[in-house]
Image (cartoon, rainbow, N blue to C red):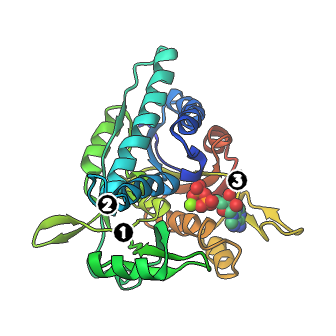
Amino acid sequence: MNKQLVIALGGNALGNTPDEQKEAVSAAARHIVQLVKDGYRIVIVHGNGPQVGMINLAFELAYKENANVSVMPFAECCAMSQGYIGFHLQNALQNTFLEQGMATHVSAAITQVIVKQDDPAFQEPTKPVGLFYSEEEANAIAKERGYTFIEDSGRGFRRVVPSPEPVDIKEKGTIRCLMENGDVVIACGGGGIPVYCKDGLLHSVDAVIDKDKAAAKLADVIDADSFIVLTAVPRVAIHFGKPEQKWLERISIAEAKQYSKEGHFAPGSMLPKIEAAIKFVEAGNGRKAIITSLENAYNAVVKDQGTIIG
Ligand code: ADP
Ligand code: MG
């Protein structure tokens, strides 16, 4: 049986413009193709923070200028980012396979991730998105559209959306099928489009699901062998950024929990990756999670470099 990997790819590593992004995905493609050659089956979950922000901003500005453009809901912006980033990744990977005479295909799946309508996150939106507004503007928009705004570190008022927990992946069967067919699959981009179930139907909601949490959930529901997080650092550290910093090679679940409790991992960046890794490893037998950099991806999977959790 081919080993199955779910790879979470950081959105900040994708650059800020379409050209930068094209270059970044080519680099990612080269590393991922090596794993495919070794027989691994792969699903890629990419981030979308800067990209969905850009799409949302473009619509907000156009709407503000009274152009003939309507307000674009955040869930739709997420769907657009899945298309935009998914296309670039798909194109770069496919061209790399073609160059190397490989018959592998690449599929990008628009993915809906199910959240609970009564997730407590909906009571307390935390994730800032879009433009900064003055207090008056923010109040007017809040009244017109029902958005929640917060004052963001003295820079103005900014909309916040909830960040609920992923519960299930609607397209998991399709993703598994494509993967078993030998395709490299791109799915759950940006954490997936958040939907909740009501009266038996799915409804989209303006929220942002953490992409590392969504990737770990996907790895769990398709029962992948390993969950790989590719980010900007080759390993996870304790005392990160301090003189006594120590890179970690392999940690048990108990150690990962202890270090988390001791505050070694930053809440907005490394902590969600560690928490996602713990969840995935705990929910099955013989599972492994790895956190490393893109450059180190192949060696981390094949030669146990990077930080291994589990
Ligand atoms: P991504 O776009 O891949 O999600 P993030 O910036 O959200 O990337 O998270 C990765 C970053 O977390 C690293 O580049 C590093 O600066 C930071 N970080 C915080 N705590 C740690 C830690 N204990 N060990 C390693 N990196 C850490
Ligand atoms: Mg991140």
Question: Is 230 rendered above or below residue 212?
Answer: above
- Rounded to the nearest angstrom, the CA distance separating label 1 from label 3 is 28 Å
Q: Secondary structure at mark 2?
A: helix
Badge 1 or badge 2: first in the primary sequence = 2
Which mark lies nearer to you, 1 or 3? 1
Q: Which mark is residue 233?
A: 3
Q: Where is residue 125, by image quadrant?
A: bottom left
Residue with the mark numbered 1: 207
Q: Are marks 1 and 2 in contact (CB under 8 Å)?
A: yes
Which mark lies nearer to you, 2 or 3? 2
Q: Secondary structure at mark 3?
A: loop
- Position of residue 50 in the picture relative to residue 124 (left or right): right
Disc 3 within 8 angstroms of ligand 1 (CB):
yes
- Position of residue 105 in the picture relative to residue 267 (left or right): left
Whole-percent x, y for residue 229 in the image:
56, 53
Q: Residues within 10 Å of mark 2 (few under 14, many from 20)?
A: many
- Rounded to the nearest angstrom, the CA distance separating label 2 from label 3 is 30 Å
Q: Where is residue 4, by image quadrant?
A: top left
In the rendered picture of this protein, how many numbered marks are placed on residues?
Answer: 3
Question: Is 100 rendered above or below residue 9?
Answer: above
| Amino acid residing under circle 1 | Ala
Q: Residue at 40% of width from left, 19% of height from top?
A: 103
Residue with the mark numbered 2: 75
Whole-percent x, y for residue 306 in the image:
69, 51
Badge 1 or badge 3: first in the primary sequence = 1
Residue 220 visible to an observer of this rendering? no
